Image (tube, coloured by chain):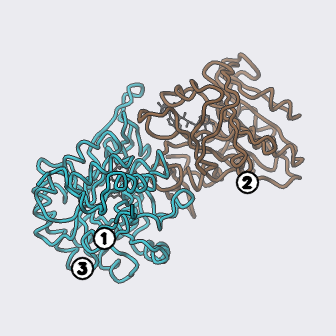
Chain colours: A brown, B cyan
Amino acid sequence: MLLNGKLITHKNIAGDYYLMEFKSHELAEAAGPGQFVHVKCGSTNDPLLRRPISIHKADKDKGIIALLYRVAGKGTRLLSLMEPGDLLDVMGPLGNGFQLPKPSEKVAVVAGGIGVAPLFFLVQLLVNAGNDVQMYIGARTSQDLLAVKDIKKLGVDVKLATDDGSAGYHGLVTDLLPEKLQKVDRIYTCGPFPMMKSVAYLANKYNVPAQVSLEEKMGCGVGACLACSCKIKINGESVYKRVCTEGPVFNAGEVDWEC
Amino acid sequence: MLKPNLAVDIGGIVMQNPVTTASGTFGFGREYSEYVSINELGALVVKGTTLYPRQGNAVPRIAETPAGVLNSIGLQNPGVDYLIEHYVPFFKSLQVPVIVNISGETVEEYAAVAEKLDKAGGVAGIEVNISCPNVKKGGMAFGSDPAMAAEVTKAVKSSTTIPVIIKLSPNVTDITKVAEAVAAAGADALSLINTLLGMAIDITTRRPVLGNVMGGLSGPAVKPVALRAVWQVYKAVELPIIGMGGISTAEDALEFILAGAAAVAVGTANFVNPRATIEVKQGIERYLIENGIKNINDLIGAAHGN
Ligand SMILES: Cc1cc2nc3c(=O)[nH]c(=O)nc-3n(C[C@H](O)[C@H](O)[C@H](O)COP(=O)(O)OP(=O)(O)OC[C@H]3O[C@@H](n4cnc5c(N)ncnc54)[C@H](O)[C@@H]3O)c2cc1C
Ligand SMILES: Cc1cc2nc3c(=O)[nH]c(=O)nc-3n(C[C@H](O)[C@H](O)[C@H](O)COP(=O)(O)O)c2cc1C
Ligand code: FES
């Protein structure tokens, strides 16, 4: 759907990171974890295209959608200037999100940096469904560890890792995984490509199914322009799929990680 | 006042209003069905189709420039046989004409695709892309040489009875030369413009932004160039023109119509506003009513005076 959502809150939560909440009952009702909205940043022709931002939270009762984003360039900088009361021009919910596991399954969720944005929504649903969830969050510094408190509040155990050792384990979040992977039934991950690639490698090694959320530059967001292609292996052959439509969530085993 | 007449005739394709979609920006139509009822459009122009499936170019395939977009999709498409099997039944279910955009690496390939579409039915027009800047073979090479352009036109015309629209490239010294050549070769109508060849460089990585290095520029940034091309071609040939390049609003569309376009296509603007086609149509109708113009055809080329 295409709508104007009224901003309720908008906060700079740390460094370049912002948390925005806007009102839309229809969107909150329709949204699934791993889906995204396509946002018009600013009202002029520069930047021209919409920007894909994951749905961070969807509160169906209150009709509120939350977005968690990092100021990366022109578009997100303009977005960060919006104030409560302003109307946000969004399309969504778009894309093919995470597939939920059976309630009995033990799940590991691995986030890198801003990749935690879509995973909060997922973790919340997993907790509500009664899944046993172990969360891993990695980032460059303690400042870049996002949504940790919110996730802990759900009663989920969170293991942290930072590149500079300023919080949690000093090193890559994927270093923490091997001891756990023998004991989980499913993995979900979103973050930088190299991180997801090593999660996919480990998932394959320990024979655990994993779902990854990919990123690509987008045009339309609805499958019409073929800008957002990514390589997916089907029966050993690499074919292009659209991140905006068949994705952004794919099975890790199907992604062509060498591209 | 009575509702003005919005219907136009593009080389035998009757459109209930002058607004259509630019190939490659609207998929095969269904992608936007949540936002646009296709039956309200004048026609649907779908993604470029080739004889064999094409994977397209490496990513990133899209980059932004001020008020514009560079794309290097590279004609990714499932091939004409797939289109006929999976999309033509949908085309047949629509009440508006569907125009299939085609491309080829050789003259024979263009002809073969046209012949298959002719047999399949459900296709009201064939738009021949001789102007794609994103493929190594064929594409723009045909569009920048009047003799080659004429050859492709003749080959397609002799393979089908469906009206043939030739889509021209702005990446030429004199667009009227190509327009004249394809008109003489039997084209039923013209589409212009395709994208302008351009590029962008990322100063952090110090490499070209697009995976394919160069790409085609579209969006509001190209509008003045497109409008100029329509103006020149309208003066040079008698054929109906589908004008495109940076149209986002009814005002933009009206400029093209006044310059000589009988119909207009909305491309990149769909990405920004998925309802752009419908809003352009409604705005044109409002303009006609407000200005007491009974027939859109009276406006075509009106900026040229008499
Ligand atoms: C499905 C999806 C969900 C996303 N969810 C979130 C989210 O929840 N929070 C968040 O902060 N970001 C998210 N992103 C990334 C976000 O879309 C980009 O950061 C944003 O488009 C950058 O726009 P800009 O104008 O600020 O920067 P630009 O000036 O356009 O670019 C700045 C930098 O960001 C990179 N970039 C631009 N577009 C993208 C893109 N689509 N994906 C990845 N990198 C890009 C550029 O290469 C450049 O290095 C998501 C991307 C996708 C594809
Ligand atoms: C993503 C994208 C894909 C395109 N694919 C095609 C195509 O397959 N065949 C074609 O003839 N033109 C293609 N075009 C060109 C458009 O149809 C149109 O001529 C051009 O973009 C100018 O119009 P606009 O500024 O309104 O987008 C494509 C343009 C874009 C942006
Ligand atoms: S962004 Fe257009 S097809 Fe995915």
Alpha carbon distance from label 2 to label 1? 41 Å
Badge 3 marks a residue whose secondary structure is loop
Would residue B230 be found to the left or right of residue A114 on screen? Answer: left
Check disc 2 and report its element: helix, strand or loop: loop
> In screen coordinates, is B267 left or right of B144?
right
Type of the residue with mark 1: Ile
> What's the residue type where badge 3 is placed?
Ser
Q: Are marks 2 and 1 in contact (CB under 8 Å)?
A: no
Q: Is residue A152 above or below residue B280?
A: above
Q: Residue tagged by mark 2?
A: A99
Q: Tell me the residue at 10%/62% (across/down).
A: B180
Q: Mark 3 touching mark 1, by CB under 8 A?
A: no
User: Residue at label 1?
Assistant: B126
Q: Which residue is mark 3?
A: B159
Task: Estimate the x, y position of residue A211 in percent, counting from the top left.
Answer: 69, 49
Query: For the residue labelled by badge 1, is the local secondary structure a helix, a strand or a loop?
Result: strand
Find residue A247 and report its horizontal and vertical position in percent. Answer: 60, 52
